[in-house]
Amino acid sequence: MKLSSRERMLAALACQPVDYPPCCFMQFTALENRCRDQFEMIDRLLAWGVDATVQVPPWLLTVPGDTRDLRGLPVRFHPEVQVREWRERQPGERYATLVKEYITPAGTLSVRVSQTEDWPYGDHVPFLDDFIIPRLQKPLLTEAADLDALRYLLTSPDMETVEQFWAETRRAKAFALERGLLVSGGTGAGADLAAWLCGLQELVYLAHDAPVFVEELMALLSSWIQERMEVVLDVGIDLWVRRAWYESSNFWSPRLYRRFILPHLKQEVDLAHRRGARFGYIMTSGAMPLLDLILEAGVDVLIGVDPVQGGMDLTALRAKTAGRLCLWGGVNGPLTIERGTPAEVRAAVQEALDTLAAGHGFILSPVDEVDDPSDHTWRNVEVLIEAWRSWVRDHTPFRP
């Protein structure tokens, strides 16, 4: 029996039999940039015959914001918070320094970053953003005394935010129902969020030098994320997604992961499951040493399985997770899709499907996205889709 896209995705997420393995892009910036909104983008994906998810709240990568990399509900400060920003330039310095202060009733937090040539925000410093991390001169948080002030920046969703979210979600859910699509919400974050606030290298040092501070910080962040989760889960979604690019073994040993990350990850997985949603976890490299812990947490799908840059052995990964964890990815985006030959793309798709779709619980996608808008990349995307269709025709009685 042929399934709807939502039924197919839900079955894959549950490691149950499917009519054929879904092909669903994690991210596709090159296409997003050609579309008015996510609804146009989804219809264009469906016209290709691939699967798609409807995001709530709706978003596109091209939408700017002070918290661009923490998608989802808007982040609102306490009304008593004041923000000051300025630019400094000292003789002999290669780059100017951008300074931002958050003045709260519990004290002032400040961050300093180098304004490099590729800094995309002018003289502004966003609150939560990947661009901050490699350009940090001084992070926003440095010690436990900063946490009281941080609470004024991480407030609970207010009624205006909730009502706006519900209004936006009604259209998205109606769109998903009409087309038989899975509804995805998010984005959660743990160490990624902490890294924006503390600096990534600095955070790992703090885990050794000030572990109690890091424990308190992670607990505060998880509590705030769970408040935001509750709002999104209330509307009835199929999949909650947490970003974990900075939670991998590239940064955290299994021992540190167990102490600082796993307890809160378990809480968030349990919350999603109690509310009827699956839990997705984005980690595109360094996942292999943490698989036992990810399985212990109860995660439903590991998003970002990359055999090229992610160091993931597909055969070992399938053997370890069969029937217990859905795997989403299988083909590298930047090197294989954006720079590879059509023959290399076909071979990568064949290997991913032969290895990971042999059982149940696999969703094909470039990892972690397709960003390059060139004709070469566009042709390779079409090659990927045709290679997937060809595999499905050879292995199932169905056609995408």
Image (cartoon, rainbow, N blue to C red):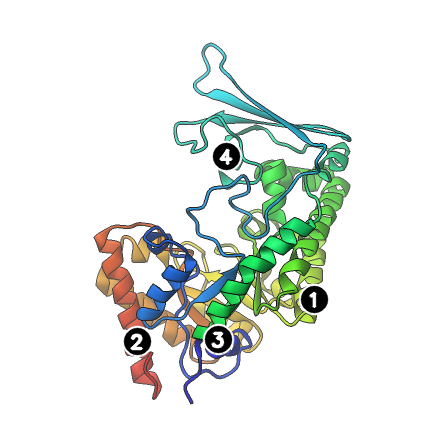
**Label 2 belongs to which residue?**
389
Give coordinates of residue 276: x percent, y percent. 64, 72
* Residue at image location 43% in from the left, 49% down from the top: 61
Callout 4: 10 Å neighbours few (<14), some, many (20+)?
Answer: few
**Label 1 belongs to which residue?**
270
Q: CA distance from mark 4 to mark 3?
A: 39 Å
Identity, as a three-letter code, of the amino acid under mark 3: Arg
Identity, as a three-letter code, of the amino acid under mark 4: Pro
* Disc assigned to residue 175: none
Q: Is 385 located above or below residue 20 in the figure?
A: above
Q: Is 378 located above or below residue 221 in the figure?
A: below
Please identify the quadrant where the C terminus is shown: bottom left
Number of numbered discs present?
A: 4
**Label 4 belongs to which residue?**
134
Give coordinates of residue 149: x percent, y percent. 74, 34
**Residue 187 seen by the camera:** no
**Label 3 belongs to which residue?**
6
Callout 1: 10 Å neighbours few (<14), some, many (20+)?
Answer: some
**Upstream in sequence: badge 1 or badge 4:** 4
**Upstream in sequence: badge 1 or badge 3:** 3
